[in-house]
Image (cartoon, rainbow, N blue to C red):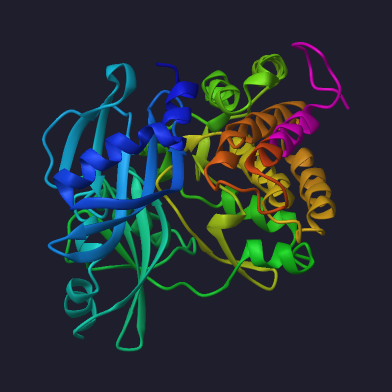
Amino acid sequence: MTEAEELALLEGRAIGPALEAAAAALTGSLIQWSLSGIHHRPGAGVTGIYAIRCEVSGEILNGFLCVTTRPVPGTFARSVRLHGPEGLPLLAWSHPNDPLLPDLDWACDARSVGPELFGVPAATLTTFGYRPMRRAVLRAEGAGETRFLKVLPRGRAAALYERHRLLLDAGIPVPQPAESPRRDVLVTRQASGTPLAQRLLEDGATGFEPEVVVDLLERLPRAVCDLPARRPWSAGVHRYAGAATAVLPDQSERIKTLASRVEYGTRAAPAGPVVPTHGDFYEGNLLVDGGSITAVLDLDGLGPGHLIDDLACFLAHLAMLPCVDERYTAVPAALARFQRVFEERVDPTALRARAAGVSLTLVAGARNSGRNQAGGGWREGALQRLLVAENFLGPGRGPGPAAG
């Protein structure tokens, strides 16, 4: 079964019998279900999150079931293996019993988090994000204090803790890590500042200069280069093109052409020297105050790389904001302002090609939210994102240097 067929299965009514079987094994008799979200990782399966209503011993309970097509070896508590159409293997679990996030159930339990983090009977918990089998981020509040919980696969929290310490020791503003009662949960204190995304929404982040972004990246300590390297987003352009094609099959030739142009542009123009990089650098991972950066978030991708890839990631995500919310009316001017400065620091052709590549990785994500917040359905949102990627390269029908 192709990824496009897996997407169609998990989004459609045909998944119903599998959900009924999963609910019977894990929770109770399924009364009602609806799709809450889809997570698609190119080459790594599709996962659906479903809001369910079940009857358990005469009581009606609400909850969530997750079903994935990703091959996951092993045996896990509160999960069940099923078969979908054509014998497709499926793994289902009741949230928060994620098979690869062993401490998620603790992080989602207010009566466990409260005593262990704050010494109170229960914490107030807010889920900021959940990517099945990858990570979850929650805010916990209690006793007048706030902590952020990042739940990770087994053994990864300690390495992320050390990344925070490394940057703090070098004077880079990142959230202060705190002692964690669970080995697979990174706990950090609340950092000061306003999300850069909010500033961009208000006025295009007027007064926040692009040079501040470049300066911070250039101040990352050399020891970052001793960490494991992670391929830049644009390096997987053909894999992500496949994901984009899965959600926009009628645009396959257009997507294929774009991917070829990105590949040509990234190979034909210099990337620059290997330097310390953030790895996933964009407005969502920056807190600011006035013209200064007060905190850099999400250090999972920290490692050796190229400055141009961090700058391209920033531009691509910035350009996507109007696709997400139509209120980002000041973003086009901000994009031009940041791109102009970035192109003075790195090769412009290579920057545009890599920004187009990052943009292409975001096309399939339009389907995850179900409906495009900027108006219209997810398909319109995906088409808008595809156009953003093409705009970085300018006119062109085939592989070749970016125009403009």
At a point 72% along the width and 54% down the height, the residue shown is: 211
Q: Please provide percent x and percent y for residue 338.
A: 77, 49
Q: Nearer the viewer, residue 367 or 203?
A: 367
Q: Please provide percent x and percent y for residue 344.
A: 79, 40
In this view of the protein, can residue 230 be seen by the observer? Answer: yes
Q: Report whether 48 appears left or right of 244.
A: left
Q: Report whether 187 appears left or right of 396.
A: left
Q: Quadrant of residue 302?
A: top left
Q: Which residues are magenta?
A: 383-404
Q: Nearer the viewer, residue 336 or 43?
A: 43
Q: Is residue 391 magenta?
A: yes
Q: Is residue 52 above or below residue 25?
A: below
Q: Report whether 365 appears left or right of 3.
A: right
Q: Quadrant of the N terminus?
A: top left
At a point 72% along the width and 62% down the height, the residue shown is: 200
In this view of the protein, can residue 155 be seen by the observer? Answer: no
For the image, the number of numbered tags is 0
Q: Nearer the viewer, residue 256 or 367?
A: 367
Q: Please provide percent x and percent y for residue 187.
A: 30, 65
At a point 64% along the width and 61% down the height, the residue shown is: 197
Q: Is residue 236 above or below residue 206?
A: above
